[in-house]
Structure formats: structure tokens, C-alpha cells
Image (cartoon, rainbow, N blue to C red):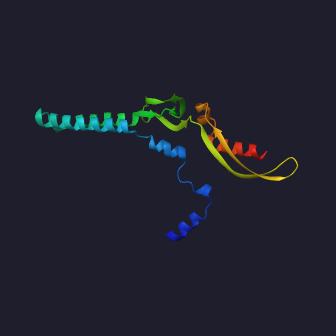
Amino acid sequence: MSLSSLLTKKDKQPKEQRRLVEPDEAKRQAKFVNPVSLTIYFVIQTLAVVAGIVIGETLGLGDLWAGLVIAAGTLLALYFLFALKIADQWEKAVVLRYGKFVGLRGPGRFWIVPIVETIPRWIDHRVMVTPFNAEKTLTKDTVPVDVDAVLFWMVWDAEKAALEVEDYRSAITWAASSTVRS
């Protein structure tokens, strides 16, 4: 099968099936490492390398001790890189420890234990706007009507939104759409 035939088959798929990355997934990937923790990582890594050079060259303790200092500095820098998280004012992070809900963190700076704790979702507490395309409905006297609607909504309970519904954004959209139809 050639590349051009794959591209044409992909383009023939409905728009709903062509989604590459979910908005929540893109946000989670962007928040994996923040600029503050990245800066701390580079500072600690630089200090570890400088300390390793000083120990190896100036103090004359040998390459083994210099390597151990650089390795310890690298591990400490990696811990800061993956442990420090920052949630924006309108966000809460759902923290799971070994897959079990621990709590919500944020807004602001917070720490997680890398490998042990994960953040599968970032819940946005701002008012969301979801437009609906024209829905064909019938009035009580059986007159066909096209309805365009806009739904304004926000998450009040982030724990329930993250743990009890797989995709709360789609659930809200479908529930509102079916309510407009009825």
C-alpha cells in the first residue's frame, strides 16, 4: 500500500475520527515538565558537573568520586525536574498514587513523588463554552425547527469529573445535545 493511498483513506474519515490528540492529553503532555523545574534541573546539573571537576582535578580524589558526585547531582536534578509541578490559577491536578486517588493539587506549586504518583488529568475550573450545530426537532404542533444552541458550563467537583466519568467534556456535550432535542 502506498503512502498516497494511506493519505487519501485518512482524509476520507469523518472529522470525529481524525482527532490526533485530545485537548486533555495535550495539556497533560505540556505540563509534564514546567519551565521552573527545567531551570532548577539545569542549575543543579551544572553545579554537579562543576563539583565533580573540582573534586577530580583540584582535590585530587580521583575519577570515581568525581563520577559519583556527578551521578548524585544528576539524580537530584532529575527528581526536581519531574517532582515539581505548577498548576495555573484556574486548574486542579488529579493526583493518583499507584493508581489510587490521593487528592487534588493546585493552584500554584506542588510536589509529587515521581514514578509513584501520576497526574492523569488537569481539570479546568473556568466557564467553558460548547456550541451546538443545528438540531432538527419538532415542536408540540409538529412543526420542524432547526435549533442552534450554546452551552455555558463549568466543573464544580473536579474529583467526580475525573474519577466517575471517562470523558466529562463529551458527556456534557451529549447530555446537553439530547436535552435540546427533547
Residue 167 appears in the figure: no
Quarter of the C terminus within the rendering: top right
Kindly identify the residue that appears in the image at 55 percent across and 48 percent down.
22
- In this rendering, would 70 be left or right of 121? left
Q: Identify the residue at horizontal 51%, vertical 70% (top origin).
A: 4
Which picture quadrant has residue 64? top left
Please name the residue shown 46% across and 44% down the image. Answer: 29
**In which quadrant of the rendered view does residue 5 lie?**
bottom right
Rendering quarter of residue 55: top left
- Image location of residue 19, percent across then percent down: 56, 54
Can you give x and y, in whole percent of width and height, for residue 98 in the image?
A: 50, 33
Q: Relative to the observer, which residue lies in front, 151 or 66?
A: 151
Q: Residue at x 43, y 33 (%)?
A: 86
Front in this rendered view, residue 5 or 126: 126
Residue 39 in view: yes
State the count of labels: 0
**Residue 141 appears left or right of 52:** right
- Residue 48 x, y percent position in the rendering: 24, 35
Residue 156 on image: x %, y %: 61, 31
* Relative horizontal placement of residue 64, taking residue 32 as reference (left or right): left
Q: Extreme right residue here?
A: 141
